Image (cartoon, rainbow, N blue to C red):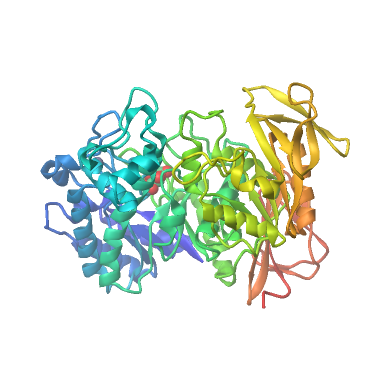
């Protein structure tokens, strides 16, 4: 089990390094990410490299038995490069140029940046390829974090080249972009530009293509470095750290270019939903890794520095969230950062080793204790989390849904997703995320919180899934447009009318605070908000109807038998209790089983392998709870065997039980 953090020795005099390694060993650290922001030290002038200091760092770490996740060092370009190539600085949609003095000040399409970064990656690979401490490569850092896109002239030319690759002819671009609307027809490629600041909404397909292009432009930066690493150090695994549900980058596409998926996540401890959000982020990473183990590359031990108010983590929360990451498939847990900086913009961001004396810091004491816990979990490595439920989630649809000028600007992809996920999390039902075009046959239940944009292939895939016997739940405003963001005609939602057995005649979005009463066929009542619509059933059975108002007695929730399967449809956003009941019904129908049944506030996740089954029980509440367990099971953290059929979990406490019978 990997354990460690970002290590920035170049911020400290060399005398500190020995102490770092000594304390890392004391904490059980076995992997550190090095040189992420070291470009100006590694290459102080064009082509002049200084590796001596980093050689000493890597040698020291290696002697201490600590492996290195070595960065290519290209995340923050040095001042000399900017001085030589001022055109590499990124430009915003309104023409404002961003300057050096922070980090990530580069245009993703800049040949000057790409080439300089590629050369540094090559130099790093050549110099460190044989170093025994090198365990994996960390390319760049958090691609797109501050500058996800650039609107400069260089980017404009690159965008045109990308569009030519996608459309071939200007006529085809005109068709896809619907340029006969508002006299936008292009006669020549040179007229095409990124969606810069316009008098009103820019062309939506242009905006959508620019999001696709911008994700690809950064991927090309990553790929240029990765090609160097593959050439010089074949066999050394390559990663770049993701940022959970980061909208600008299509991580489905990116993850295909990584040997190991790794993630950075910083849920706000002041947010009552933070435990759920942390779980959601981990499930996304496991899904991007297609079920394989992944690494939590960054998180914080205590406070961050970048919120208006930076809440501290109460004792035990750091451990709880780390073990939650392991429960949800991580085989490594790292922090930003090892030693808290003394200078610079992040000196008030906490670390494993804080400013003061370590022995007086709860972060350090907890980091040490966590290292000891993780050292007991090697048997868990490589095991998998099995899910019977999938949530369909596509970046392209997210982008298109949230472009402006819609029936409601309040329908947000992640809100929709959480409205479903919450009940699976509360009910300890394991869930994967899936693309709309993935093979879904192995899932008993597929949830579609919103899929505004989809391809014909995806539509056929979801239809075929239900036809073959699957159960599906879909919410409103799905199946609206094709990949060109053109409306799918023939009655809403055109690709799903047969599947759902209904037609949507009109949308009646609700304003903030407006609620409609909903009556269920079984006599229970609930409410809907955010959205409502006029649904005419065409074979679907009505499970609930709106009660009062213009939609009185019209369907709010329906169910349709399609082929061998069943499709539910929600014409509004149900209140939480009604949603919980509806999903419970769909789960029962689909035969989905929870991982474990126990007291509320205790999360349960199972990892499975031929070597064992591990049941993680995580107490998110601030109270002690009694949980049912099998008597005589080994508990990994305490090293004890359960002596009865219940176990006491302290506030934020965790138990990891070894269950009989691993996967075959
Ligand atoms: C990440 C970044 C780190 C550090 C951290 C602070 O976004 O990769 O370098 O800035 O945030 O929370
Ligand atoms: Zn640019």
Query: Viewer-proximal residue, 393 or 265?
Result: 393
Task: Evaluate whether residue 435 shows in this view.
Answer: no
Task: Evaluate whether residue 5 shows in this view.
Answer: yes
Q: Quadrant of the C terminus?
A: bottom right
Would you say 285 lies left or right of 10 here? right
Query: Viewer-proximal residue, 586 or 415?
Result: 586
* Residue 401, placed above or below residue 434: above
| Image x and y of residue 348, in percent | 40, 38
Identity of the residue drawn at 67% across and 67% down = 614
Residue 97 placement: quadrant: top left
Number of numbered discs overlaid on the protein picture: 0
| Image x and y of residue 154, in percent | 21, 42
Quadrant location, ligand no. 2? top left
* Residue 546, placed above or below residue 598: above
Would you say 565 lies left or right of 160 here? right
Identity of the residue drawn at 73% across and 44% down = 623
| Image x and y of residue 279, in percent | 59, 50
Would you say 595 lies left or right of 109 here? right
């Amino acid at each position: 089990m990997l354990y460690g953090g970002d290590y920035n020795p170049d911020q400290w005099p060399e005398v500190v390094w020995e102490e770092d390694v000594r304390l890392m060993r004391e904490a059980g650290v076995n992997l550190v990410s090095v040189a992420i922001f070291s470009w100006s030290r590694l290459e102080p002038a064009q082509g002049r490299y200084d590796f001596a200091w980093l050689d000493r760092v890597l040698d020291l770490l290696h002697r201490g038995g600590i492996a290195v996740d070595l960065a290519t060092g290209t995340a923050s370009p040095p001042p000399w490069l900017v001085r030589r190539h001022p055109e590499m600085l990124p430009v915003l949609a309104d023409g404002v140029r961003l300057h050096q003095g922070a980090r990530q000040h580069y245009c993703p399409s800049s040949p000057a940046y790409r080439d300089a970064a590629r050369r540094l990656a090559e130099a790093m690979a050549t110099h460190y390829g044989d170093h025994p401490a090198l365990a994996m490569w960390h390319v760049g850092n958090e691609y797109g974090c501050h500058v996800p896109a650039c609107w400069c002239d260089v980017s404009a030319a690159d965008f045109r080249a990308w569009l030519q690759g996608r459309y071939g002819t200007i006529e085809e671009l005109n068709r896809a972009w619907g340029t006969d609307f508002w006299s936008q027809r292009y006669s020549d490629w040179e007229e095409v530009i990124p969606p810069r600041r316009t008098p009103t909404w820019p062309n939506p397909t242009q905006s959508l293509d620019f999001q696709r292009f911008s994700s690809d432009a950064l991927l090309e930066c990553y790929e240029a470095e990765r090609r160097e690493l593959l050439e010089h150090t074949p066999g050394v695994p390559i990663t770049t750290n993701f940022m959970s549900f980061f909208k600008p980058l299509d991580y489905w596409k990116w993850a295909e270019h990584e040997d190991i998926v790794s993630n950075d996540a910083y849920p706000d401890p002041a947010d009552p939903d933070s435990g759920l959000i942390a779980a959601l982020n981990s499930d996304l990473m496991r899904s991007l890794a297609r079920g394989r183990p992944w690494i939590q590359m960054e998180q914080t031990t205590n406070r961050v520095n970048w919120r208006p108010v930076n809440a501290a983590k109460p004792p035990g929360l750091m451990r709880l969230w780390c073990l939650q990451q392991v429960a949800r498939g991580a085989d490594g847990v790292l922090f930003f950062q090892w030693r808290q900086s003394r200078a610079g913009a992040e000196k008030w961001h906490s670390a494993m080793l804080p400013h003061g004396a370590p022995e007086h810091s709860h972060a350090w004491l907890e980091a040490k204790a966590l290292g000891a816990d993780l050292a007991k979990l090697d048997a868990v490595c490589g095991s998998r989390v099995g899910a019977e439920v999938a949530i369909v989630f596509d970046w392209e649809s997210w982008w298109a849904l949230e472009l402006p000028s819609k029936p409601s600007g309040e329908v947000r992809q992640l809100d929709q997703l959480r409205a479903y996920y919450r009940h699976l999390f509360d009910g300890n039902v394991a869930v994967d995320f899936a693309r709309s075009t993935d093979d879904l046959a192995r899932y008993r239940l597929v949830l579609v919180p919103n899929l505004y944009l989809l391809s014909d292939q995806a539509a056929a895939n979801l239809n075929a899934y239900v036809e073959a016997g699957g159960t599906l739940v879909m919410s409103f405003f799905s199946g609206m447009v094709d990949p060109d963001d053109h409306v799918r005609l023939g009655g809403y939602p055109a690709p799903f009318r047969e599947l759902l057995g209904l037609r949507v005649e009109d949308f009646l979005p609700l304003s903030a605070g407006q609620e409609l009463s909903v009556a269920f066929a079984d006599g229970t009542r609930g409410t809907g908000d955010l959205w409502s619509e006029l649904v005419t059933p065409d074979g679907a059975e009505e499970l609930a109807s709106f009660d009062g108002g213009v939609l009185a007695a019209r369907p709010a929730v329906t169910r349709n038998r399609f082929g061998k399967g069943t499709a539910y449809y929600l014409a509004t956003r149900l209140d939480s209790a009604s949603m919980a009941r509806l999903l419970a019904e769909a789960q029962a129908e689909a035969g989905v089983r929870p991982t474990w049944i126990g007291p509320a506030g205790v999360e349960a996740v199972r990892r499975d392998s031929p070597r064992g089954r591990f049941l993680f029980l995580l107490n998110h509440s601030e109270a002690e709870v009694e949980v049912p367990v099998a008597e005589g099971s080994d508990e990994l953290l305490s090293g004890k065997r359960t002596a009865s059929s219940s176990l006491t979990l302290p506030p934020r406490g965790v138990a990891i039980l070894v269950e009989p019978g691993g996967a075959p």
